[in-house]
């Protein structure tokens, strides 16, 4: 199961799993850096030399099927429906294969979902894109890992639709998460400073910068 599929992710994904081994996709919101690579994923599942594999579910906010058809320049009907079964997300709980998901709206200009994924007694929370958000603390309560956006640095924060690294650490501390992984790191900030600012807060667990290929063993 994939959580978000932003631009460039299909290439990186193939270092870890064949595309035909993916069983489900969850999209947090419709901004391009979180969903655009559903387009090449659709191409791979539609025109591959071994024929078209069975449809898989793509979970996303209302209008995801239309948004992705527009992104590729397809007619809305059938759009990508011959490869994907689009399912509309709602706040609350859901079961996807062996995974128990809890979903909540985040603080972002478009409808955006944060995720908590639980399986075999382990849990991961994912902020997607958000400003300060009590619902994120609830999602991440006691989670083994919080994968949290940290777009801003202190003193450079813009509108309340993204978090600073320090605010990410504050959310992790309030949630009692076991480990914090900082993601959504923008290229005009130094990642080192993001790590320093997060580490200066009250969160006492390990803090890691996300990078392509990072693997975390939950035991």
Image (cartoon, rainbow, N blue to C red):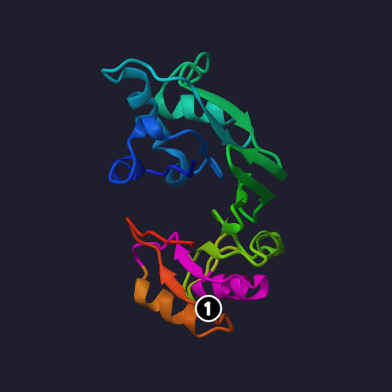
x, y percent for residue 170: 60, 75
Q: Position of residue 153 (x, y in %)?
A: 46, 74
95 or 32, which lies in front? 95
Could you tell whether 63 is left or right of 14 in the image? right
Label 1 environment density (alpha carbons within 10 Å; few <14, some 14–19, many ≥20): some
Q: Position of residue 34 (x, y in %)?
A: 46, 45
Residue 15 occupies which quadrant of the picture? top left
Q: Residue at x 43, y 19 (%)?
A: 74
Give left or right: position of 216 versus 65.
Answer: left
- The percent position of residue 207, horizontal first and vertical second, equals 46, 74
* Left or right of 14 in this view: 118: right
| Magenta stretch encompasses residue 58 | no
Instruction: Specify the farthest residue to the right.
Output: 92
Q: Residue at x 56, y 71 (%)?
A: 178
Please say if 40 is above or below 26.
Answer: above
Residue at (36, 60) in percent of width and height: 214
Callout 1 secondary element = loop
Segment tinted magenta in the rendering: 164-188
Residue ID for mark 1: 205
- 173 w.r.t. 130: above or below: below
Write down the quadrant of residue 168 in the picture. Answer: bottom right
Q: Is residue 109 visible?
A: no
Residue drawn 62% across the image and 70% down it: 171
Q: Is residue 215 above or below residue 61?
A: below
Viewer-proximal residue among 124 and 167 = 124
Residue 124 shows in this picture:
yes
């Amino acid at each position: 199961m994939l959580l978000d599929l932003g631009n460039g992710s299909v290439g990186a994904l193939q270092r870890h799993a064949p595309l035909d081994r993916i069983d489900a996709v969850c999209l947090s919101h419709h901004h391009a850096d979180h969903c655009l690579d559903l387009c090449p994923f659709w191409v791979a599942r539609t025109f591959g030399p071994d024929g078209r594999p069975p449809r898989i579910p793509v979970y996303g906010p209302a209008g995801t099927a239309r948004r992705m058809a527009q992104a590729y320049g397809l007619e809305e009907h059938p759009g990508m429906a011959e490869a994907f079964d689009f399912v509309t997300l709602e706040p609350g709980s859901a079961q996807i294969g062996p995974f128990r998901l809890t979903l909540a709206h985040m603080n972002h200009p478009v409808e955006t979902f944060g995720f908590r994924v639980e399986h075999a007694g382990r849990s991961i929370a994912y902020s997607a894109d958000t400003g300060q958000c009590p619902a994120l603390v609830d999602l991440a309560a006691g989670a083994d890992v919080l994968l949290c956006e940290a777009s801003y640095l202190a003193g450079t924060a813009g509108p309340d639709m993204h978090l600073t690294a320090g605010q990410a650490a504050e959310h992790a501390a309030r949630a009692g998460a076991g480990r914090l992984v900082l993601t959504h790191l923008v290229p005009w900030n130094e990642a080192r400073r993001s790590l320093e600012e997060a580490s200066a807060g009250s969160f006492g667990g390990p803090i890691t910068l996300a990078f392509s290929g990072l693997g975390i063993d939950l035991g």
